[in-house]
Amino acid sequence: MKQSMIVVALLALAAPAYAQLGGILNKAQKIQEAKGKFDDLNVTEEEERTIGEQVSAKIRQRFGVVQDPAIHKYVTLVGTLIAQQSERPNLAWTFIVLDTDGVNAFASPGGIVHITRGALGLITSEAELAGVLAHEVGHVAHKHAVNAIRKGKAVQLGANETLSSRGPFLDKIANKAYDIVLENKFDRNDEMDSDKVSLTLAEKAGYAPGKLADFLTRLDERNKDQPASNGLFASHPDTQARIEAIRKQAGSRNGAVVEARYKAHVKYKPTPVTAIATVEDGASGLTGSTKAGDKKEDAKKEEEPKKKGFGLGGLKQAVAPEKQSAQVSASGGSRGVGPDRAAKGGSNPAPVKVSVSNADVAEFKRGVA
Ligand SMILES: [Zn+2]
């Protein structure tokens, strides 16, 4: 009784202070709104995650999710071990296995990393998986997608929009981020940066650094007969440059490869690149498929030349001009997307929730030997 009276009295005393604080906050918000017109891409960590969730939802819709908790748990353990070594260990890191034969990995802002069943099939050891996931963790840790949008001024506040109504604005960023992530439109410096992060994080976790290069080499070999204009993973000199840079940085440093545990957990077999079923651009994984090679429609829908990004497999922009024009004439002037990007996906976009504790990760790390 007495206590509650004191509380009431305190609240009464505090009320004017609250009102004052409210006024200050209002003023601060107005200043922020005015500033927002000029620097409107200062997204908060929470907003970054919101954007990432939207990007992930689209990726999951496009490729489907493998509805298997066991594979998700394994990939989450490797991924979490890696993410804990990063500059942003406390993000709600989430690892998702996409249900497609295409070989790919996508990093959503805010800490949602996707890797395809096809990539897991091509990877041969835990150190390689760690290397690929660490590359994607690098994109997230260094905010490459959001920064690319900011640098490109690709998204701006509309005339009647303010920072206090950020929903539609964040939607625009999310749409742009999806495009960047799906098409691997990171620029060369960001890719090189993520490769460096990959080395560092893999090594800190106890893995042999540079195994990412082994994976890229295998991918390059797999894609050697693909025309360079026809995919993210086509063989061309910049993939080699990237592989060489990784190998050089890794030098003679070594660590655990962990092949046996990988093979015990991952049973997927790689699908030959020519046997990957594809869908038309814009179609979700839910709808019909055509065989790889039937990609004229996809090609037409590619709006802009891929000058910048490169995915797991290499730079697209770096095709020598004479080589590129030869390809253009060979393919009737159309630009295709590769079978990995155009790959058909599974029908279920629902995330598979797994929980992994710090103790689980610590226990798991003891197997990195
Ligand atoms: Zn990348």
Image (cartoon, rainbow, N blue to C red):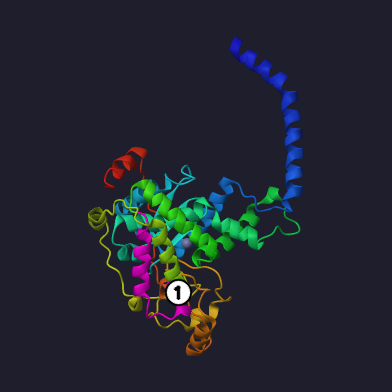
Q: Position of residue 88 (x, y in %)?
A: 49, 45
Residue 54 lies in the magenta-colored region: no
SS class, disc 1: helix
Q: Residue furthest top?
A: 2
Q: Is residue 328 visible?
A: yes
Eyeballing the image, is 56 above or below 87?
A: below
Quarter of the image where one finds residue 220: bottom left
Q: Position of residue 125 (x, y in %)?
A: 29, 58
Q: Which segment did they paint magenta?
A: 209-233
Q: Is residue 349 visible?
A: no
Quarter of the image where one finds residue 362: top left
Residue 218 lies in the magenta-colored region: yes
- The residue that disc 1 covers is 237
* Residue pictured at 60% horizontal, 56% vertical: 147
Q: Position of residue 216 (x, y in %)?
A: 38, 66
Q: Position of residue 86 (x, y in %)?
A: 45, 47
Query: Which is nearer the eye, 343 or 228?
Result: 228
- Indicate the quadrant containing the N terminus: top left, top right, bottom left or bottom right: top right
Total labels drawn: 1
* Residue pictured at 35% horizontal, 64% vertical: 215
Query: Which is nearer the eye, 314 or 14?
Result: 314
Residue type, label 1 = Pro
Query: Which is nearer the eye, 166 or 124?
Result: 124
Ligand 1 within 8 Å of the CB at mark 1: no
Quarter of the image where one finds residue 217: bottom left
Query: Mostly what secondary structure, the magenta segment?
Result: helix
* Residue pictured at 26% horizontal, 47% vertical: 369
Eyeballing the image, is 345 above or below 227?
A: above
| 10 Å crowding of disc 1: few (<14), some (14-19), many (20+) | some
* Residue pictured at 68% horizontal, 20% vertical: 11
